[in-house]
Image (tube, grey):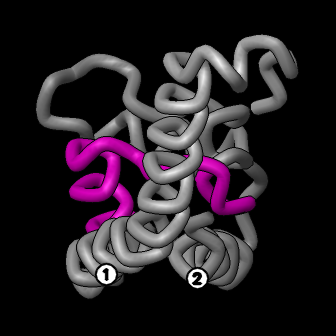
Amino acid sequence: MFYDFGEELYKARKTKGWTHIQAAMKINSICVKKESVASPDSLSKWERGEVLPKIEAVHAMAQVYNKPDLYQKRIAAIELATKEKSPAATGLNEKLSYCYSTTLDSSSQSEGFRC
């Protein structure tokens, strides 16, 4: 879902020549909250575009990777995901409305629930 953002993170880490473990250590070392915001597993998920990191992690990665544009790219990823979800959510809502209305109709109950 967030593939472009993930690709950007992957390239930034590879440019530095770091493993997931090394990158996580660097990111966590400058985190303002002084708690772990990145693990090797979470970095992998972010790079594959499965999920987006929290803003604290983006802040730390922007500094570690020297890529201040990561903030804007995260916002763009959220906006794109919102646009992509809208038609699907609309279609799902229409199907659920249809299913709900047909189950209330006594003639459709004899046919069984097909949704």
Residue shown at the point (73%, 76%) measured from the top left: 14
Q: Which residue is mark 2?
A: 4
Residue 40 spot, x, y in % from top left: 69, 36
Q: Rate crowding at label 1 as few (under 14), some (14 to 19) or many (20 or more) other CA atoms within 10 Å.
A: some
Q: Which residue is mark 1?
A: 76
**Residue 58 is a magenta residue:** yes
Instruction: Tell whether label 1 touches label 2 (CB within 8 Å).
Output: yes
Which quadrant is the C terminus positioned in? top right
Residue 65 seen in render: no
Tell whether 67 sits left or right of 100.
left
CA distance for labels 2 and 1:
10 Å
- Span highlighted in magenta in the image: 46-66
Residue 9 occupies which quadrant of the picture? bottom right
Residue 41 occupies which quadrant of the picture? top right
Q: Is residue 38 above or below residue 11?
A: above
Residue 113 spot, x, y in % from top left: 78, 19
Residue 112 spot, x, y in % from top left: 84, 16
User: Which amino acid lies under the numbered mark 1 shown in the image of this protein?
Assistant: Ala
Label annotation for residue 66:
none
Tell whether 24 sits left or right of 55.
right
